[in-house]
Amino acid sequence: MAITVIACSQQFAAEVGDIDLRRPLAAEDLAAVREAFRTYAVLVFPGQDLTVEQHMAFGANFGPLEKTVRAVFHGEKLRVRPEIADIANLDGNGKIWGTDSRFRQFQMGNRLWHTDSSFKAPSAYASLLYARSVAPIGGHTQYADMRAAYDALPQAMKDRLDGSFAEHSLMFSRARLGFDNFTEEERRAFQPTVRPLMRTLDDSARRSLYIASHIGHIRGMPDEDAQALVADLIAHSTQPQFVYTHRWRVGDLVMWDNRCTMHRGTEFEDTRWKRDMHRVTTSDRLDVFDIAQCALRTEAASAEY
Ligand code: OGA
Ligand code: MN
């Protein structure tokens, strides 16, 4: 039986059924998933039961997997292998973190609207987040359609964004939360990347806003103007008509296109309920900005985070 794709919202999020991600997909099913992923930037695969290896193998259909090469991540030893981003509220021993956890302070940045790895070179294409345990209340993930948000902008704003470039760093999004005690090593790893504010997607030719809470500066613009512009654009693109909210169940895998979406986690009692999620992330193609950025960096450290 062929896979089924049922829209959850118009042209933005869809649920994919009649598919078992534990096994390599038949060529026609993979082609159907790719086609759905071009149309819908968020795909939900409910009721999966994946090992880490199966999760990674499905992700690898969409590009090379990002890796963390550090054994210790923001003061916690890694619970997971380097190809997995640990999106859980657990410490290195698998216990629910406390409010004093440095890892928690860092992960709080996921509550701000962002797109994954815009601060890395190359940035991310697909993120695939898999729920192992979920909170009974809250802890949803919201997604914003940056293609529809771009299309809805007044022409004067589109013209203003065309040819404008922003600097993205994990330090900028964390600074919004008052967190700035980065180590020297982290400061080196989080040197900003330069990204266009508007991008054209090579597979659909659609245009998309490319913004995130990771933006600290816009080239050639005073910082107060830049911050006000980013705030306006985030407010515009997260209006209800552009947003899909995913309420997690254990076994859900949600995959999104970081080139043309933003997302954020919603609040929950994170020192009470265990919420254990694994993310596999694939790299986007290198663009001219990445090549320049890689050449400028003395250490390719950002790939480690
Ligand atoms: C992520 C992320 C938010 C959440 O996995 O990249 O930002 O709801 N997650 O956990
Ligand atoms: Mn994220």
Image (cartoon, rainbow, N blue to C red):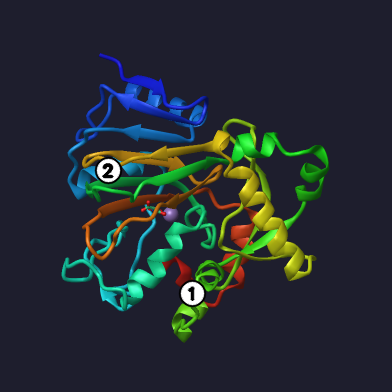
Query: Is 146 on the left-hand or right-hand side of 174?
Result: right
- Residue 57: mark in rendering: 2
At label 2, which amino acid type do we have? Ala
The picture places residue 254, in percent across and down from the top left corner, at 35, 40
At label 1, which amino acid type do we have? Ala
The picture places residue 182, in percent across and down from the top left corner, at 46, 81
Some atom of ligand 2 lies within 8 Å of the CB belonging to the residue at label 1: no
Q: Is residue 201 visible?
A: no
Q: In which quarter of the image is the N terminus?
A: top left
- Residue at image mark 1: 189
Q: Which residue lies furthest to the top in this view?
A: 1
The picture places residue 237, in percent across and down from the top left corner, at 61, 43
Bin the neighbour count of mark 2 within 10 Å (Cα to Cα): few under 14, some 14-19, many 20 and up. some
Q: Which residue lies furthest to the bottom in this view?
A: 184
- The CA span between labels 2 and 1 is 28 Å
Some atom of ligand 1 lies within 8 Å of the CB belonging to the residue at label 2: no
Question: Residue at (64%, 33%) from the top-left corner?
Answer: 206
- Residue 281: mark in rendering: none
Callout 1 secondary element: helix
Q: Which is more toward the observer, 46 or 51? A: 46
Which is in the foreground here, disc 2 or disc 1? 1
Q: Can residue 93 be seen in this view?
A: yes
Query: Is 81 on the left-hand or right-hand side of 279?
Result: left
Contact between labelled residues 1 and 2, with CB atoms less than 8 Å apart: no
Residue 86 vs 202, above or below: the answer is below
Query: Is 291 on the left-hand or right-hand side of 185?
Result: right
